Image (cartoon, rainbow, N blue to C red):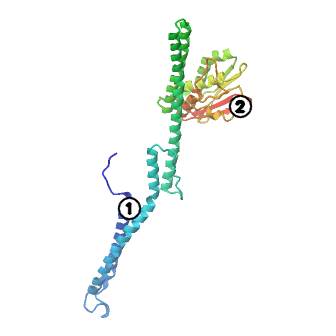
Amino acid sequence: MDRRPGLSVRLKLTLSYAGFLAVAGALLLAVVWGFLLRYVPDNPQGLLGVSPNRYLLVRTFFPAAAVAITFLLVFGLVGGWILAGRMLAPLTQIRDAARMAGTGSLSHRIRMKGRQDEFRELSDAFDSMLLQLESHVAEQRRFAANASHELRTPLAISRTLLDVARKDPTRDLDEVIERLHAVNTRAIDLTEALLLLSRGDSGAFTRESVDLSLVAEEAAETLLPLAEQRGITLDVSGGAARTSGSAELLLRMVTNLVQNAVVHNLPAGGTVTVRTEAEGDTSVLRVENTGRPLPPDLVPTLTEPFQRGTERVRTDEHVGAGLGLAIVHSVVRAHDGSLDLVPRPAGGLLVTVRLPGTP
């Protein structure tokens, strides 16, 4: 933004210091004149015939007062310049850090030393903002790179299939079309998941009253054939748990949790338990499933986009892009809730979603 040049803050403070000091000195001299010199007789004999008269005192006083005022003004300018520089030194550090951040260097931190004051609070807030901004930018770059990689894979497969069909006219076209359909379906699902993730991150949705128990029943009814196909027992129970949010996003959140619990389970004889309840002012959803034991260091990474542990990668028709729990995390965060993932000692995962409750 273009602005007209003006005085620096340091110079303004310096002039203010000097002006106040000069005014205070002038007032002090005025007080001396008003309460002292007016009692001195204005006659040739002076006071009691021995003291100088008012005329002589005035001629002696005013030159000395002018020197004193000049000294106070110069002292105020020099001292004010030094004091203003020391006071504004922390602001200079913050300015330099802001300029570095403007050039793309987000790793710089001020880390201002000294006791707590307004400048230190501003510095700490700026450091905290830089930390969050650096983390957000790194996450966005990583997300963009992973999304590009994931989307490039089905496109590359489609091009390969088309090249093969063009070079080999004798190849079964039905097989090629079927494989192209599967690849395109996966690309569409991935794109829809990316759009849903973006929508959850932006928080652009209309809020309404939603009962998590009804959402859980709907999600379980949709995934019941998948659970029966895999020999998984799906149990949904609990009381009403109302919250305010998007019914569509919350349904996708619960569906992703239940689908993950079904897919990442034991080969046969596994269980998935879904519980809903209201705990005070909080609505709670718990999804617990059996399965293989999960390494503790793997669990925190499951909510990151495209992060798929080797123990959870599927090779069947339900292979995912690693966005299921990322979407869940995004929806929970957009609804001002919390998401906890705890590995079960016997294997499997316990996922707890806590959202602000409504009457």
**Residue with the mark numbered 2:** 344
The amino acid beneath tag 1 is: Leu
Count of numbered circles in the view: 2
| Residue 47 visible somewhere in the drawing | yes
Distance from Cα at disc 1 to Cα at disc 2:
64 Å
Other residues around mark 1 within 10 Å, as few (<14) / some (14–19) / many (≥20):
some
Q: Nearer the viewer, residue 155 or 118?
A: 155
Q: Position of residue 304 (x, y in %)?
A: 58, 32
Q: Amino acid at mark 2?
A: Arg
Q: Name which quarter of the figure residue 226 lies in.
A: top right
Residue appearing at x 30%, y 89% in the figure: 52
Q: Residue furthest bottom?
A: 49
What residue is rendered at 48% in x and 55% in y? 119
Q: Are marks 1 and 2 in contact (CB under 8 Å)?
A: no
The percent coordinates of residue 266 (x first, y second) are: 71, 22
232 with respect to 176 (left or right): right
Which residue is disc 1 drawn over? Answer: 13
Task: Indicate the position of residue 81 as horizontal and vertical percent values.
Answer: 39, 64
Quadrant in the picture for the N terminus: top left
In this picture, is 275 found above or below 132? above
Name the quadrant of the C terminus.
Answer: top right
Kindly identify which numbered label has been placed on residue 266.
none
Spot occupied by residue 27 in the image (x, y as percentages of width and height): 34, 73
| SS for dot 1 | helix
